Amino acid sequence: MPFNAIPAKDFLNRESELRYLGGLPALKGNALGGDVFLEGARGIGKTELLAQLHRALFWEDKATPFYYSFKTANLKAAYFAKDYFTRFVRQYISSAKKDPSLANHAAEPLQRLMPVIASLGLHWLIDCIEDFQQHVNNNDGYWQMVSAISAPVVAAQKSGKPVLVMLDDFDAAAHLYETHHGDAHDLISLFGESMQSSLCPHIMTGAAGALGAIFTDHGLLGKTEPLPLGPLPQDLAAQLFRSHLANLNIACPAGVPLKSLAILRGNPLYIRNIAKAAWKMRKQELSEKDLIECYSFDVASGETAFYWSSLLSRCAGNAPRRKAMLKLLLHSVENGGIADGKRLAMISGLDEKETADMMEALKTAGFIDKQDAVLHDFIGCLYAQEIEDRELAEARSKIEARYLAAEETASFELVIPMASNAELVVAKAVEQIGINIQLDAEFLNYLQLALIEVCINAIEHSGSYEKKVYLKFITRPDKLEIIVENSGKPFSLETLKDVPVEEKLRLGLKRGWGFKLVYSIMDSVKVERVNDRTRVILTKNIINKEVLHEVGSIQRGIPA
Amino acid sequence: MKSDQFSVVSRLDGDAAIIYPKGYLNNLSGESLVIECGIYIGKGITKIVVNFGETSLINSIGISLLLQIIEDLRNIKGTICCTNMSKFLKDTFEMLGLMKHMSVFPTETEALKYLRSGKK
């Protein structure tokens, strides 16, 4: 076997993909299927799916599996050709003899395998090896590549048995070169002929959406079916994690909800790495808090950190570029995307073209993923260490504090129209939220009043064309935070004046009390301008459930 | 919070008008309250009792309209009494400094007694 696959019982939720890919030789033989491009985020399990498929086919007799990883391949044509050809020959005879060990002795020259090949009656394979050696002796790089890449097709034709070719991280093949990086742009197209063979279905893996960039030949593109691989659902992610823990002799009581696993978004690589982090940290029984601790360890200095850090080094090539890339990545994480070229160049400290090239490399390598919170945490940690020169422990505790606080947080969002009595909907919502977190009914009346006032202010004074008010309620055990946002005219607390009631009566000014009430009720009131929106952030500390039975505690916040 | 629609009903008890605002006291309902009181003031009534027993929620616009009633009564040397106020309502009026411009009683009966005798 070219690699270790996890036990089949721990390989969850991929049965249909496995069945489909296993049936690919028959489908392609009957012109009902072509080649498959397996795409998905890093760590989602593409390689593991190939490993499982390889293992299944190895012991069956329907097709010969051949797996090749471009992840660690030397992309110089001559080296690549030799490596590809040698690995194919080893895996082929390993499969024919049903002896997994034959595939693993990479250092053993092919000549030594001749007796085994002869004993299997694979004389055509001996011819293949001799032909390949002839191209090597002639120093003919092109024919070495052609011979290597077409070896599976030759084997399938000679034996009459299909060869299923699995090319992992195939997008890297776009960087194959002859003598210097970038001197040959289309060596990848040499795979085209092999891919067209009805006896050789190819399964390639790569980043989502990379297929179009790999093939410039539309004929190949059309015959290749993209197969996206999604994350594990939450229940199966927990099941897989528990299974890894059990294999590592770490207990995890059934009552532990493993809520923090949601950060990993069903990524099997991350799930495995956290389990291994727990083992490295010598955990014997895992609690929810331990899980966050293991996560911070993994993302700051564990296998996940090593995985992404190695990838970043490979992508950067040298230390100054790595630093520049790290700055760009943090900017991308903090701003939820990528800014324009000039701004990015200012961030990286390099010129626009080099910055654009780096961004492209980062995108191709899968670093720009808005959904991947683990990657974002890794970037934050690495930035703190390599750019801000902070201690690892500090970066870790920052992550832990954030997730421990978030663990007890619930949030609700609401959008109301700027219409008559819409603020009552908000009042009703805050009432129910308060009931959910067991707040005192009278306390809720004050919160309702404060919110009603902020909403009325937005409805009456913003002049918004959008005519909507956006609210977000974030509840924590010790605090309730309410964010009210609307487009329209800016609003500033500084413009508010506290006019005593006597003065109001004298001047006939009866309005202008809304924010006085809000100030009196809430512990903190902040007003921000975010693009064209006004954002009011209200915070109320929940000291205990009876806090609002004391009038004094309400009144202490009234501005003088 | 009760989600009752706002309504105002009233009755005359001797020389005092008793007003019952019900539901959410905002701009629209506050206007109704001002109109209702205005009708009595127009008829020469100078003593008004507002029973807040059925007022579920109030906003600053509703409060400002209550200030209008206080002002109207002040102009005719009248008296406003508020009764059956929840702690929330009392605290809110207190926050805004309104309490010193009105007489507050736990019940309607106590307010009427005060209006008749002039003593608390």
Image (cartoon, coloured by chain):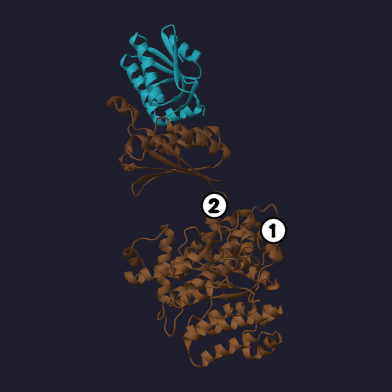
Chain colours: A brown, B cyan
- Residue A360 is labelled as none
- Picture residue at 66% right of the left edge, 84% below the top: A122
The picture quadrant where one finds residue A359 is bottom left
Classify 10 Å Cα crowding around label 1: few (below 14), some (14-19), many (20 and above): many
Amino acid type at image mark 2: Ala
Classify 10 Å Cα crowding around label 2: few (below 14), some (14-19), many (20 and above): some
On the same chain, marks 1 and 2? The answer is yes
Q: Name the residue under label 2.
A: A406
Looking at the picture, does residue A276 appear above or below residue A233?
Answer: below
| Quadrant for the N terminus of chain A in the image | bottom right
Q: Position of residue A295 (x, y in %)?
A: 58, 62
Return the chain for callout 2. Answer: A
Outermost residue toward the top?
B14
- Label 2 SS: helix
Q: Name the residue under label 1.
A: A252
Looking at the picture, does residue A483 appear above or below residue A400?
Answer: above
Q: Where is residue B55 in the image (x, y as percent from the top left)?
A: 48, 23
Front residue of A455 and A164: A164
- The answer for how far apart the CA atoms under marks 1 and 2 are is 21 Å
